[in-house]
Image: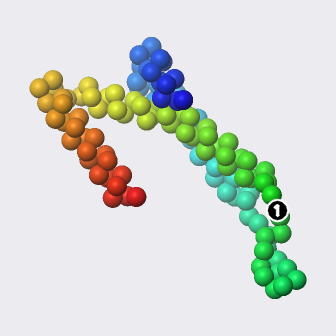
């Protein structure tokens, strides 16, 4: 969804401005996820069979907060940083090297993703 939004606003806003305007939202979403991790500490206790189990059950506030932060991160990252990098990558090379250089950059990206995963 975010990349589709970027298609329509990237030319009017400008690549640099789009990246700078989405950065505070990306930062805020990382803070929200961090806060949810801080709030998600659970109490554990022994049940009647001697097994340690969490005392709270079901979906808690911290779990919902983490989902909001992750969705917010994915949305704003895909609007600003994800799509902008690929459009800049196609424009920075001389015209006679553009196809080869973009292919090498894409192959390097996929290879790096494979190695990391």
* Residue 97, x across and y down, in percent: 14, 30
Q: Is 92 on the left or on the right of 4, as rendered?
A: left
Q: Secondary structure at mark 1?
A: loop
Residue at the extreme front: 49
* Residue 4, x across and y down, in percent: 49, 25
Residue at the extreme left: 96
**Mark 1: few, some, or many residues within 10 Å (few <14, many ≥20)?**
few
Residue at the extreme bottom: 50
* Residue 1, x across and y down, in percent: 54, 29
Viewer-proximal residue, 60 or 13? 60
Q: Quadrant of residue 29?
A: top right
Query: Residue beneath label 1, please?
Result: 57
Residue in the picture at 26% in, 47% down: 108
Against 113, is 73 above or below?
A: above
Q: Is residue 22 visible?
A: no
Against 108, is 53 above or below?
A: below
Residue in the picture at 78% in, 54% down: 59
Residue at the extreme right: 48
Residue in the picture at 83% in, 69% down: 55
């Amino acid at each position: 969804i975010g990349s589709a939004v970027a298609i329509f606003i990237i030319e009017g806003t400008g690549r640099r401005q789009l990246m700078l305007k989405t950065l505070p939202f990306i930062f805020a979403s990382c803070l929200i996820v961090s806060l949810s991790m801080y709030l998600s500490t659970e109490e554990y206790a022994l049940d009647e069979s001697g097994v340690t189990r969490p005392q709270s059950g079901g979906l808690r506030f911290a779990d919902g907060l983490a989902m909001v932060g992750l969705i917010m991160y994915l949305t704003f990252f895909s609007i600003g940083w994800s799509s902008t990098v690929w459009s800049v990558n196609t424009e920075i090379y001389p015209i006679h090297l553009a196809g080869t250089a973009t292919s090498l950059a894409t192959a390097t990206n996929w290879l790096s993703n494979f190695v990391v995963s």
